[in-house]
Image: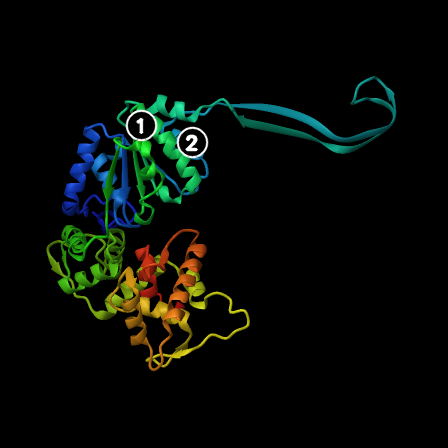
Amino acid sequence: MKATEIFTPGRLPTHTYVGDHLQERAKELQQALNAGALVISLSGPSKSGKTVFVETNVGRDRLVQVTGAGVNSPEKLWDRVFDLIGTPITSSSSNSKGFDGKVGGKVGGSAGFLVKGQGEVSVEGAWSNSQTTTETDSVDYLQLLIRELSDTGLVVFVDDFHYIPAEVQKEISNQIKEAARQNVIFIVASVPYHSDDAVRANPDLRGRLVKLDFDYWDQDQLVKIAHAGFKHLNATLPQGYLNALAAEAAGSPQLMQTLCLNTCFELDIEEPFAAGTPIETSDVTFQRICGRTAANSDYSSTTIKMSEGPKTRGQDRKHYQLVNGEICDVYPLILKAVADDPPELTIRYANLQERIGRQCAREVPSGSSVTGACSHIATIANESENRAILEWDSGNDVLDIRDPYLLFFLRWGHRHI
C-alpha cells in the first residue's frame, strides 16, 4: 500500500475513515432510510466530511451523486442524474445543405447547374453543410425522474445544494416534494448558513424530511486520522507533531488528510516500513509541510485583493506601525490578525481587536474602521471566488471563515499579506 492510497484528501478514505463520533448520526440516517424517509437534509460546514459520511453509510453503489455547482434550472440538475443512470433524453436531428452566394454569366450547353459546353460562368459563394440537434420540448423531467427512480432503492444525492440560485432551489424543492411522494429518495447537502434552504423551508416536506446537522471535527478526532494512516505505514511520529497538524487543520478532516499526505512526501514515507519505525520531525519540517500544503490550496489572488481593499476614491488610508517594523493600513492588518495563533474559523469582535492589538506597535485602528474593513474584505473574497468563503456578521460582529483552506493559506502563504 502506498501513502496516496492511505491518505486520500478529496476521495473516500478506506484506511483512514474515522466515524466513531458520527455513530449517532449514522444510526439516525439508517433509521430514516429504513423508516421510509424520502428526503434527508444534511447541513454542515465546507470540508467537514458530509460527502464521505454519505458515501460510507449509504454505499456508493446506491448513490446517484450530483453537484449543485453550475445548476441554473431544474432540468440541468436532472440532466446530470439521467446521465449517470444512463437514461437518454429524447432529441431530434436534421441535416441541411445550402449554397450562399450568386451565379452569373453566359452558358451554352446542356441544362443544369453544373454544365459542360460553351460560355462563361462566374460563381461567388460557398456550400454549407450543417446538422442541428434539438431537445424535444415534450420531455417531462419530473415524470421521467419518477419513472426511472421510484422504488429502486437508489438515492439521489445532491451535494453543494447551496450553490444553486435561490429561485431555482424553490423549483427543485417542489419537484423533490412530488418525486418523494412517488418513493424517490433524496439526500440534499448544504452548509449551515444555508440551513434554511428551500428544501428545509418547504412546508410541504414536513413529515417526509429528516434533518442531520454536522460541525467541524475536534482536534482529538483529527489526530485519529493520522494515527490510523501512519499505523498502516509502520511509522511512528511524535504526538506533539500530530497535535500541531490537527490544530492547523482547523476542524477539517479533508485538510488533515492533505497535511498527513504531504508529511509522507516530505519525510519519504511513501510506502510502509518493514517494522514500526520512529520518525523524527522538527520545526523546519513542520514549516516545509505547511508551506507545501498552502501551495496546494492557492488563494493568492484573492488574498492580494483582500489585502488591497476597495478603491480609495482619492483618499489615503491611515497606516499603522506593526511590532515587526512593517507599516500597513487596516486591510492587511486584519488579515495578519486573522492569521495569528491560534487558528480559529470564527473570530468575534473582541477577539479580533485583541489580535489586532498584538500586531500593532503603537496606535490601533478604531472599531468602526475594523468593522467596515471586515465587511469589505468579506465582499471582496466572495466576489473573487464566486462563492461564499467568508462572512462578516454585522449584527453580531463576528468574522466567520467558511473554508478552512482559506484560513490555512492566510497563515502559511506569508508573502501575500
Q: Residues within 10 Å of mark 2 (few under 14, many from 20)?
A: some
Q: Nearer the viewer, mark 2 or mark 1?
A: 1
Taking depth in this image into account, of 126 and 144 the one nearest to the observer is 144
Taking depth in this image into account, of 207 and 358 the one nearest to the observer is 207
Taking depth in this image into account, of 355 and 409 the one nearest to the observer is 355
Q: Residue 146: where, in percent of width, then height?
A: 35, 23
Residue indicated by mark 1 = 180
Instruction: Using the rendered view, name the quadrant where residue 176 is placed.
Output: top left
Q: Residue at x 18, y 39 (%)?
A: 26
Taking depth in this image into account, of 149 and 193 the one nearest to the observer is 193
Q: Residue 383: where, in percent of width, then height?
A: 45, 55
Q: Is residue 107 visible?
A: yes
Residue indicated by mark 2 = 79
Mark 2 and mark 1 lie on one chain; the one further toward the N terminus is 2
For mark 1, give the secondary structure. helix
Give residue 326's mark.
Answer: none
Q: Is residue 84 visible?
A: no
Image quarter in which the C terminus is found: bottom left
Q: Residues within 10 Å of mark 1 (few under 14, many from 20)?
A: many
For mark 2, give the secondary structure. helix
Instruction: Using the rendered view, name the quadrant where residue 204 is placed.
Output: top left
Q: Residue at x 32, y 73 (%)?
A: 356
In the image as oriented, which residue stretches furthest toward the left?
276
Q: Residue 400: where, in percent of width, then height?
A: 32, 58
Image height check: is 67 above or below 256? Answer: above
Q: The disc labelled 2 sits on which kind of residue?
A: Asp
* Number of marks in picture: 2
Q: Residue at x 49, y 22 (%)?
A: 138
Q: The disc labelled 1 sits on which kind of residue?
A: Ala
